[in-house]
Amino acid sequence: MSATSGLQSFTWNGTTSNGAAAPSGTYNVAATAAVGATNQSASTLLAGTVQSVSLGTSGTGVTLNTPQLGSVALSNVQQIN
């Protein structure tokens, strides 16, 4: 996708590049930015809805459980709305 600097939104309709339904499974998101004549990796952020919170056995290690992203360590969360 072509984008300007800053946060960019995207959606995926669950199909492959030839229009067929993508198989069930786990997928990764990666972004590359063209900086002049060089491609550089860019940070990605994904949104999810928290269904529950799990605590580690000693009260540490908070994990957020989401249907979209699975289990996410609280230390990996960048923003809460």
Image (tube, rainbow, N blue to C red):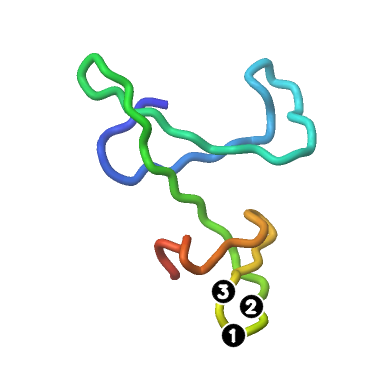
Furthest residue to the left?
36
Q: Amino acid at mark 3?
A: Gly
Name the image quarter holding residue 65: bottom right
Q: Secondary structure at mark 2?
A: loop
Dividing the image into 4 quarters, which one contains the C terminus?
bottom left
What residue type is disc 1 on?
A: Gly
Q: Position of residue 28 (x, y in %)?
A: 59, 38
Residue 58 position within the rendered picture, expressed as x and y whole percent measured from the top left:
62, 85
State if disc 1 and disc 2 touch (CB < 8 Å): yes
Q: Residue at x 27, y 18 (%)?
A: 38
User: Do tag 2 and tag 3 residues touch (Cβ < 8 Å)?
Assistant: yes
Could you tell me residue 70's position as x and y percent?
67, 57
Q: Which residue is mark 3?
A: 61
The N terminus, quarter of image: top left
Q: Secondary structure at mark 1?
A: loop
Label 3 Cα neighbours within 10 Å, binned few <14 / some 14-19 / many ≥20: few
Side (left or right) of 8 relative to 36: right
Quote the CA–CA distance across marks 1 and 3. 7 Å
Which three-letter amino acid code belongs to the residue tagged 2?
Gly
Q: Which residue is mark 1?
A: 59
Q: Is residue 59 left or right of residue 42?
A: right
In the depicted structure, whether residue 2 falls above or below residue 52: above
Give me the residue at 56% from left, 74% from top.
61
Q: Position of residue 72 (x, y in %)?
A: 58, 61
Residue at point 64%, 35% (across, down): 13
Q: Is residue 64 above or below residue 12?
A: below
Q: Which mark is residue 56?
A: 2
Would you identify the image quadrant in which residue 36 lies? top left
